[in-house]
Amino acid sequence: MEMVIALACSAAVLFGADRLLLWLESRGHIHWRRKGRKDLSTEPTAELDSMLSEQPRQ
């Protein structure tokens, strides 16, 4: 019986975490399930990358 209670509690926690992450996604804070992952190769490079890259100084 303890195992059933533990599994039910685990399922409730996972369901609650999923709902929380979906709510955060709807607010625009994270990408969870509905919007998918970004393709990082199409994203612009960060300022730090451009500062650290080897470019000839003028």
Image: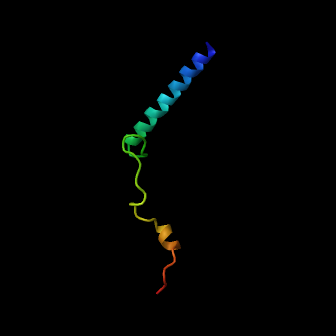
Above/below status of 10 relative to 48: above
The front one of 29 and 55 is: 55
Taking 15 as reference, is 5 left or right? Answer: right
Picture mark count: 0
Residue that lies at the very extreme toward the right in this rendered image: 2
What's the residue at 51%, 24% (across, down)? Answer: 12
Residue that lies at the very extreme toward the bottom in this rendered image: 58
Quarter holding residue 25:
top left
Residue 5 in the image, given as x and y percentages of width and height = 58, 17
Q: What kind of colouring is applied to the model shown?
A: rainbow
What's the residue at 40%, 52% (across, down)? Answer: 38
Above/below status of 37 relative to 54: above
The front one of 37 and 51 is: 37
Residue 52 in the image, given as x and y percentages of width and height = 53, 72
What's the residue at 49%, 68% (across, down)? Answer: 49
What's the residue at 54%, 20% (across, down)? Answer: 8
Residue 6 in the image, given as x and y percentages of width and height = 59, 21
Above/below status of 12 relative to 37: above
The front one of 57 and 24 is: 57
Quadrant in which the N terminus appears: top right
Residue that lies at the very extreme toward the top in this rendered image: 1
Residue 43 in the image, given as x and y percentages of width and height = 40, 60
